[in-house]
Amino acid sequence: MERWRRVISQYRSVPGDEVPVVLSRDGTHGPVVHGLSAAARARGIETGARVVDVQAIHPDLHVEPTDLEGDAALVKRLVHWARRWCPWTARDQDHGLLLDVTGCTHLFGGEAAMLRDIRSRFALQGLTARCAMAPTPGAAQALARFGSGAQICGAEDVGTALAPLPVAALRLDAQTTRLLNRLGLKTIGALSDLPRAALMRRFASLKPERNPLILLDKALGKAADPLNAPPDHRHFMARSRLAEPVLDPAPHLPALVEDLCAQLARAELGARRLRLTVYRIDGDWRGLDTATARASRDAAHLRRLFDGKLENIDSGFGFDLMTLEALASEPLPLMQDHLDGKRDPSADVAGLLDRLVAKLGPEKVSWPQWRETHKPEAVEERAPALQASPAAAPALLRERPLRLLTPPEEVRVIYAVPEGPPSQFNWRRVTYKTTRHAGPERIAPEWWRDRPGTRLRDYYKVEVAGGQRFWLYREGVIHDGRGAEPRWFLHGMFA
């Protein structure tokens, strides 16, 4: 909700604090509530409720669509931003963070001082943080979400601190939580006081991530609950600091490329997207981006991608700093060259694509892609060469003509009714007599995509007296109830 307010305020007014606002997302039976404002929460609205049901009770409710992808991207960035406090951070469900601060609290003046620093720094970002510190991830999460919001729990006080919390604090799903509540187990203390043998028989069929007893043991520290932290984002950048301002970046580019390729080689990575940046002496900067069809750290190849583009950089009165960074990289292990000295053909094709895209633009170079469709004219489509790989043609296309007419051209045909092959046809004022034919190949309409009344096609391969081979089809058959007399079209020519 706080992120939504910050984004919306940039281009339109935000509803006042007294207005109940909910963020909705798609649910099984229509939109459901995903986020709540303070005014909406004060009215008793809960997440997961159907929006239509809530609007029936609260007609003045203000509903806005939520941005799930934007929220996930924010949490992903916060995971790495939170490593200012400790080296191990991970995402906790949809809107939480887990930090392993073991051995780090003394750097901030103690546990209480670290929690105050965490809350204040999140507040500077416009976000409200509920924090808790406990010996286990499960206990810390339960106290942060269902406790006071700024609680420190020692190893000997875990059971006492968790006892008054509801069983939903154990990261249980809604179904298991409802089952425990029907059994009268509404708090963690009530769950831990019961004999384990009877409960284990009741929940033995549940998976570990849903079993309340296993989650209780993890929260109390009786079972292992390791923190799986994502790796740090690796940033590769080469810098060139100049003694005095210059206007031409070309003489300094080879050294930058060599430096960047050496960094990538040590990490066994290859660059997919590059950015060259010059920092002008007037405080401004100019950037130039390029991309590759596949991961590469060939210095000569990467340097050629900037040929003809450096003149477009406005250097102003000069620049004294240049950087070349890999915006995106992919694994590229070290490989030995062939003993016979031959080059990898796919590498040559990728290099050619990179140079063409760098010169003509990414929208001008494309690969053929194949679609699952009945219509021969719609089988092939184009995709940008840097975003897709060439796909092998379906086996059926080997029997199709190399050249198709777009659109097919109507012809006059003499044939044996109702479904005989063409014996003679007239195309572009020339009459052709059929000597041999093959077919028909019947192609039915796509009932899930075509309009009602679309007629089937019967395709024939025909060879005429002059040796030419054509691909004709009859649209519909007599008395099919979908139109008048069938029409004939010439759709392609064979080599």
Image: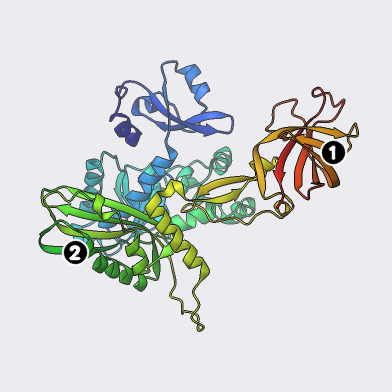
The image's mark for residue 66 is: none
Q: Nearer the viewer, residue 312 or 78?
A: 312
Amino acid beneath label 2: Ser
- On-image quarter of the N terminus: top left
Q: Nearer the viewer, residue 239 or 153?
A: 239
Q: As drawn, is 411 to the left or to the right of 117? A: right
Q: How is the image coloured?
A: rainbow
Q: Measure the alpha-carbon separation of dots 1 and 2.
A: 73 Å
The image's mark for residue 422 is: 1
Q: Is residue 160 visible?
A: no
Q: Which residue is located at x 50 percent, y 80 percent?
A: 338
Q: Which residue corresponds to mark 2?
A: 240
Q: Which residue is located at x 25 percent, y 62 percent?
A: 104
Earlier residue among tags 1 and 2: 2
Q: As drawn, is 421 to the left or to the right of 368? A: right
Amino acid beneath label 1: Pro
